[in-house]
């Protein structure tokens, strides 16, 4: 029969393996600054078994890099909506207002 100490360690390992919320938090925290050695180990264990969080990490890193590049250039992007999209949105707004 396994000891309680072993059960506690296994439960802790399971929490690390199945806790995507904490993993994404650690991924974001690491992109902003530093994480502790323990957090690094926990994240590596989780990422070894979770492909979704690995994808999230890759995408987050790419988004961060794109934002840094954008901020370095100093150019303000021109963001506009095309006329077709504007028309669709206007129709939706009018439909919603006419329901009341």
Image (cartoon, grey):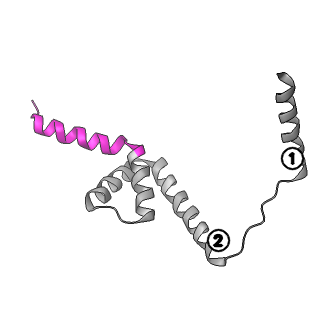
Q: Position of residue 30 (x, y in %)?
A: 40, 62
Q: Position of residue 1 (x, y in %)?
A: 9, 29
Residue at 86%, 29% in the rendered image: 95
- CA gap, disc 2 and disc 1: 26 Å
Q: Residues within 10 Å of mark 2 (few under 14, many from 20)?
A: few
Is residue 58 shown above or below 85? below
Q: Position of residue 45 (x, y in %)?
A: 32, 52
**Count of marks overlaid on the render:** 2
- Give the position of the C terminus as an image quadrant: top right
Q: Earlier in the sequence, mark 2 or mark 1?
A: 2
Q: Is residue 5 magenta?
A: yes
Q: Position of residue 40 (x, y in %)?
A: 32, 59
Which disc is residue 20 wearing? none
Q: Which residue is mark 2?
A: 70
Magenta residues, start to end: 1-21
Left or right of 14 in this view: 1: left
Q: Main secondary structure of the magenta part?
A: helix
Is residue 65 shown above or below 51? below
Given residues 19 and 89, the one toward you in this image is: 89
Residue at 66%, 77% in the rendered image: 73
Left or right of 81 in this view: 54: left
Residue at 83%, 54% in the rendered image: 81
Given residues 9 and 25, the one toward you in this image is: 25
Q: Which residue is mark 1?
A: 86
Q: Quadrant of residue 35?
A: bottom left
Left or right of 34 in this view: 99: right
Q: Residues within 10 Å of mark 1 (few under 14, many from 20)?
A: few
Q: Quadrant of residue 26?
A: bottom left
Residue at 18%, 42% in the rendered image: 9
Given residues 67 and 7, the one toward you in this image is: 67
**Circle 1 — which element?**
helix
């Amino acid at each position: 029969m396994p000891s309680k100490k072993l059960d506690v360690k296994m439960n802790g390992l399971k929490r690390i393996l199945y806790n995507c919320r904490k993993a994404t938090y650690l991924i974001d925290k690491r992109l902003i600054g530093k994480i502790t050695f323990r957090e690094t180990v926990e994240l590596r264990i989780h990422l070894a078994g979770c492909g979704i969080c690995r994808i999230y990490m890759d995408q987050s890193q790419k988004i961060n890099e794109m934002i840094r590049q954008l901020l370095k250039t100093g150019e303000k992007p021109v963001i506009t909506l095309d006329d077709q999209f504007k028309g669709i949105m206007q129709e939706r707004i009018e439909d919603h207002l006419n329901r009341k």
